[in-house]
Every structure is written in structure tokens, then in C-alpha cells.
Image: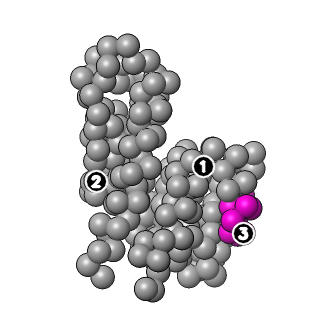
């Protein structure tokens, strides 16, 4: 099977990165992770890249031409898919246009509800009965692109932000790989 060269963008612990690395080892899983990008040099997820001998880049998003330099590296690794896995920066319209290939994101709510940050607090404040996660294509608007997959669970009255976050992450580990398979099923 010819696999799609993929780059994973992270900002933190990289638990979705770790899950995707493990899944990418399956013969039938459609991606090969060729590069990891982080906007934080202290991101713990970089350790997953190091342990698995995956090249990684630390980008300084305050640098003037960082997106241009990043596009050069994506081309160097022949990247055809970017997965945003806890990446906490917005990609510019120009970057998305210049990359010109698929970019997907996983978000910890049932979009279009609760776009942006502080998702779990918003869910509790609004007394939601259910929540979950969404994988969607990235477009020029925040958490707006076409939805690929969603999964949900019902909120227990005793759930707090940490419990909801843990339940959501467990769903993310299922739905992110399923969404990648779904995208490339009909190649």
C-alpha cells in the first residue's frame, strides 16, 4: 500500500500524535508520518517524534517568514496531508492556499458548537446533555470547515472539566484515525 506522507502539528502532550504514530504502523492505515511540527519547544509531544525517529521542527510563530520556511520543509518531505492534533495556532489563509492540499483538525466539541478555546468550560456552563469531538477539514474560518466525522457521549451530572476532557480524548483516539481512513478510502 502506498501511504500518504503526513505531517502532524502539535502544541502540547501529543497524545493524538502518539496514537496516530501507533496506527500508522498498521499496513492498511493510509498515512506515513514523515514530519512533526510544534510551535512550542517544550511540547512533550516532541518526545514521541524523537522516540520514533520522526523528524521534527520547532517553529517560532512570531518570526516574520515562518510560514514560508514551513512550506519549504513540507515540500522537502513531500507532505500531502497535515493533521492538526492539539495545535493551538491558527493557520493563515495564505498558508492554507499556498499549501494547497488537505489539512484536517480534531476539535473537542460537537461543532459547530463551542468553537475556539475553553471548550469544556463552555460545555458545562451551557448545561449540555452530550458532547464529543469533531474532525473537520480546515478552511479560512476558525473551526469551520466541512465535517468529516463526529462522535459523542452523554454527560454525567457528576462530570467536571477534567472528566469531560478525558472522555473526549478517548473518543478522539478512535475518531481521528477513522476520519483519516474515511478521507482516503476511495483513492
- For image coordinates 50% across by 24% down, the residue present is 162
Q: Nearer the viewer, residue 179 or 39?
A: 179
The answer to whether residue 29 is magenta is no
The mark found on residue 14 in the picture is 1
Dot 1 or dot 3, earlier in sequence? 1
Q: How is the image coloured?
A: one colour
Q: Nearer the viewer, residue 78 or 23?
A: 23
- For image coordinates 44% across by 18% down, the residue present is 160
Judging from the image, what secondary structure is the residue with disc 3 in?
loop
Tell me: 131 left or right of 108: left
Judging from the image, what secondary structure is the residue with disc 2 in?
strand
Res 115 quadrant in image = top left
- For image coordinates 33% across by 37% down, the residue present is 132
Task: Examine the rendered structure and indicate whether residue 129 appears above or below residue 1.
Answer: above
**Quadrant including the N terminus:** bottom left
Dot 1 or dot 2, earlier in sequence? 1
Task: Examine the rendered structure and indicate whether residue 66 appears above or below residue 134.
Answer: below
The mark found on residue 53 in the picture is 3
In front of the other: label 3 or label 2? 3
**Residues rendered magenta in the picture:** 49-59
Marker count (numbered): 3
**Quadrant including the C terminus:** bottom left
Q: Name the residue that disc number 2 marks.
A: 149
Amino acid at each position: 500500500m502506498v501511504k500518504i506522507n503526513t505531517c502532524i502539528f502539535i502544541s502540547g502532550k501529543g497524545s493524538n500524535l502518539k496514537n496516530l504514530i501507533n496506527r500508522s504502523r498498521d499496513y492498511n492505515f493510509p498515512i506515513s508520518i514523515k514530519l512533526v511540527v510544534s510551535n512550542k519547544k517544550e511540547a512533550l509531544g516532541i518526545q514521541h517524534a524523537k522516540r520514533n525517529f520522526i523528524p521534527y521542527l520547532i517553529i517560532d510563530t512570531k518570526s516574520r517568514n515562518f510560514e514560508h520556511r514551513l512550506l519549504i520543509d513540507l515540500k522537502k518531505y513531500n507532505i500531502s496531508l497535515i493533521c492538526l492534533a492539539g495545535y493551538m495556532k491558527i493557520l493563515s489563509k495564505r498558508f492554507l492556499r499556498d499549501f494547497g492540499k488537505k489539512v484536517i483538525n480534531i476539535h473537542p466539541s460537537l461543532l459547530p458548537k463551542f468553537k475556539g478555546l475553553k471548550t469544556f468550560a463552555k460545555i458545562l456552563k451551557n448545561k449540555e446533555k452530550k458532547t464529543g469531538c469533531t474532525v473537520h477539514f480546515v478552511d479560512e474560518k476558525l473551526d469551520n470547515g466541512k465535517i468529516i466525522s463526529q462522535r459523542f457521549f452523554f454527560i454525567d451530572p457528576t462530570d467536571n472539566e477534567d472528566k469531560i476532557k478525558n472522555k473526549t480524548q478517548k473518543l478522539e483516539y478512535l475518531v481521528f484515525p477513522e476520519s483519516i481512513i474515511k478521507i482516503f478510502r476511495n483513492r
